[in-house]
Amino acid sequence: MKYISTRGHAEALDFEGVTLAGLAPDGGLYVPESWPRFSAEEIANMAGLPYAELAVRIMAPFVEGSLTEGELRELCTQAYGTFAHEAITPLVQLDEQQWLLELFHGPTLAFKDVALQLLGRLFEHFLSRSDDHLTIVGATSGDTGSAAIDAVAGRDRIDIFMLHPEGRVSDVQRRQMTTVLSPNVHNIAIDGSFDDAQAMVKRMFVDAEVTGKYRITAVNSINWARLMAQVVYYFAAALQLGAPQRKVAFSVPTGNFGDVFAGYVAAQMGLPIERLIVATNINDILHRALSSGDYSAGTVTPTAAPSMDIQVSSNFERLLFCEGGRDGAALAEQMRGFEASKAMQLTNSQREGSAALFTSARATPGEMTQAMAYAAEHYGQTIDPHTAIGLHAARAAGIDPSVPVVTLATAHPAKFPDAVEGATGTVPELPARVGDLFDREERYETLPGTYEAVRDYVVQCATPSA
Ligand SMILES: Cc1ncc(COP(=O)(O)O)c(C=O)c1O
Ligand SMILES: N[C@@H](CCOP(=O)(O)O)C(=O)O
């Protein structure tokens, strides 16, 4: 399998290459040259497989040429062995139509663990083939940071630099990152938003002063391997609900467009998906783009669903590429315009192509709170603010009542105790595996929100490539 850049200028790479590269050197994101596709019979034969085995079936075509099936199986078995639920991503029925897909049973209590427990192991596996050192630079609005840190803490040949927007993540989220004191973990609080942090990370990938000396890679969903691993739970859920004979809709709390793009990939691979509902909070650039073609970023407004406080959604570029005729040169031009003005209009083909599968909905803070209260009262479920936005959208989307709608429960409610208590009157308890979080020592660096300050810090602390 070969991967190409959405901006058309970078060399095509295999799976090992894109995993270690993170972002393409032309600033684009890697996508497979073509989508592998399963027949209905092949999908039907996946029903009932244990999660790790299903993961092997779904991911095998993407890693071809870089991992043997046996290597992939070993990595998946280890990665999903860290989860606290036997089903890994259990499906919970709410009523005749609505379901929750619980993605928060990994070590750091958010859906990010599903991919990052695998990605950490992939890095180590590929590094063992050389004597190189890897420098991870990442940005987090709360959940990617802790999941990535958990996945690579203490690994000899990896350093991780994780930027978070100071004061804009929950206390639990911050402590899940900053109480990991391994010497290879570098937490940085920046004065700015997640978008600022993400822009700095992307800039580092095209800064010769950094790339000339350090082998940098990404743990954000700009890294293809993240998305690949997230495709698996769409299959897992749909198979339990009758796929491939029956279509399923998914409602996805969305920020960086990674999770919902994984759903798009599942559909390209043959999974019959009725609709993908893109659920946003008031940072609603994606809702505006999908409903009116207007992709223009305002300033980020902090909300009680901080992980979705994003206005520049990296993976949207992948959709624009795939639905815009896979024209890298044209997309590079379109993205240059967006980077300069922070605004762009989708082309007709990008709009029409997206409309075939995607629907969107936006939840105000009040609607998010109501959805948490509704889930507690009517379904007996305590859900987190991000999941609540998904559930609000799932119920508002007007999906045919005969089609099951699965909301992705992206984080454990205990990560956001204040918002959950405000909506339901109940304080969710931290699971035992992180029960001592507030007794642990914290360590992190605070830096001004300038690229130079962050770059200099990374350069000063990182280990040069071999
Ligand atoms: C809890 C939670 N829900 C939803 C999202 C949005 O997911 P994505 O950025 O893949 O759209 C995030 C952050 O990524 C998150 O941490
Ligand atoms: N919501 C994320 C932001 C980054 O998203 P990613 O999926 O691209 O890593 C977070 O919680 O950090």
Image: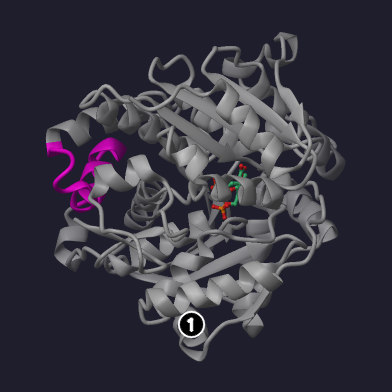
Residue placed most toward the observer, 348 or 11:
11
Residue in the image at 27% along x and 21% along y: 131
**Relative image position of residue 361 (x, y in whole percent):** 67, 70
Report crowding for label 1: few under 14, some 14 to 19, many 20 or more residues within 10 A (C-alpha): some
**Relative image position of residue 73 (x, y in whole percent):** 20, 33
Asked whether, in this view, residue 52 is left or right of residue 184, the answer is: left
Q: Quadrant of the C terminus?
A: top left
380, above or below 370, in the image? above
Image quadrant where residue 294 sits? bottom right
Q: What residue is shown with label 1?
A: 350
Q: Which amino acid type corresponds to the residue marked 1 in the rendered image?
A: Gln
**Relative image position of residue 387 (x, y in whole percent):** 64, 50
Based on the picture, tell me whether residue 188 belongs to the magenta stretch. no
Residue in the image at 48% along x and 35% along y: 113
Q: Is residue 4 visible?
A: yes
Residue placed most toward the observer, 338 or 311:
338
Residue placed most toward the observer, 39 or 292:
292
The range drawn in magenta is: 46-69
Based on the picture, tell me whether residue 67 belongs to the magenta stretch. yes
